[in-house]
Amino acid sequence: MRVLIVGSGGREHAIANALARSPQRPELLAAPGNPGIGAVARCFPTPVDDLDGLVALARGEAVDLVVIGPEAPLVAGLADRLEAAGIAHFGPSAAAAQMEGSKAFAKEVMSSAGVPTADWAEVTSVDEGMEAIDGRYPTVIKFDGLAAGKGVVVAPDAATARAALTEMIEARRFGDGPVVVEDFLAGEELSLFAICDGERAVPMVPAQDYKRIFDGDEGPNTGGMGAYSPVVGAPDVDDLVAQIHQPVVDLLRERGTPFHGVLYAGLMLTDDGAQVIEFNARFGDPETQVVLPRLRSDLLETLVAATRPGGLASCAPMAFGDDWAVSVVLASAGYPQSSSSGDVITGLEDAARAGAEVIHAGTARDAAGAVVTAGGRVLNVTALGPDPAAARERAYAAADLIQFEGRQLRRDIAQRAVERVTP
């Protein structure tokens, strides 16, 4: 089988590695890929926003399955174009991908399906937003559309809220569109992926990520500085999917826009139970980098089954190991406000020999062929272990073998898990 992976980040590298472990031994292609993905797949320079080019590539290479990694091409309709071309694909249609592409759409679906989430309002002016907040702080302000993970502000007071609303609505920092204002949820965060075939949602294992740049959850939000799996004390995943994911899948099917792909729920475990912070329409990053290394069954079999209505019912259940996975992000200088490119990276082979899975997230090759930084989050260093302490120790030992100018990393990834399981 020939499989094309669309994307160039850490999530896509983790997917490529998992597919390379399939007993079906697929031939892997990637567009555009990165130096790490290039070790297991043939890479093509087609960018993720060239939808016609991606369809032409899939057709020209006689691809059997296209796995769409990032959210932007999903929201733009890549799955629809592949469907029209008769090419099998893993990823939702543009209509179903609005679960990520529009915060207001997702909130309306949750409200209609009875999925627990924070109270919310859609607003189109600063004054309307301040009225909706009505003095409740902290409050959460979200740009409705895609904003590369940067369109969310947790406002502790009125001045911050008004500034955020002004930036999003009047200054149009992220483009035209409304804003969602919602109540702040307190608790512990949990990420849970479910593979969906348009009719059924099947859970993977839970993970927890770290969004802020500095230890102790200090500093600005990032795309994620690390993650671990499993999560001590997490609710039963079957119960969560029945409460969170399955009602969404049922409602979208009833509306004629069935969801095929990964429905990712970012959850807050509150005193009143799990509530949805957000939905994504694809594998999350960096959680994918700790979930897929624990997978013991054939990812390719599951993805193919999900492309067919009801196909997961006849597919072998996903199986995961009992081991722990810890992933540490190595970020470039200036991240998250900016990023540094062109800094030579050393120690990649040493880290791999130390037993870690080194995932490329923002790398490239320079004119001399050296691997260099090419983005904010540069690498994920993932290690497995029989307990969180062992996995964490291995991940950090390997991460410290990798060096580049301005390297940033958190030192407390999975520390809370170690503390919870240590007698």
Image (cartoon, helix red, strand yellow):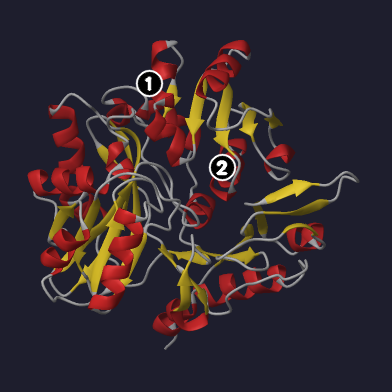
Q: Image check: 229 left or right of 398?
A: left
* Residue drawn at (46%, 33%) of the image: 73
Who is closer to the viewer here, 130 or 27? 130
| Residue type of the residue flagged with mark 1 | Asp
Q: Is residue 55 above or below residue 92?
A: above
The circle on residue 88 is none
Residue 120's x, y, as percent?
A: 14, 58
Number of numbered discs on residues: 2
Quarter residue 63 falls in: top right
Q: Image check: 124 left or right of 413?
A: left
Closer to viewer: mark 1 or mark 2:
1
Contact (CB < 8 A) between labels 1 and 2? no
Who is closer to the viewer here, 81 or 249? 81
Q: CA distance from mark 1 to mark 2?
A: 20 Å
The residue that mark 1 highlights is 80
Q: Is residue 386 above or below residue 192?
A: below
Going from N to C along the chain, the mark reached first, 1 or 2, is: 2
Residue 294's x, y, as percent?
A: 50, 54
What crowding class fits label 1: few (fewer than 14 Cα within 10 Å), some (14-19), or many (20 or more)? some
Quarter residue 349 falls in: bottom right
Quarter residue 247 falls in: top left
Q: Image check: 155 left or right of 401?
A: left
For mark 2, give the secondary structure: helix
The residue that mark 2 highlights is 12
State which quarter of the image contains the C terminus.
Answer: bottom left
For mark 1, give the secondary structure: helix
Q: Image check: 163 left or right of 250?
A: right
Who is closer to the viewer here, 397 or 57? 57
Who is closer to the viewer here, 63 or 103? 103
Residue 244's x, y, as percent?
A: 20, 51
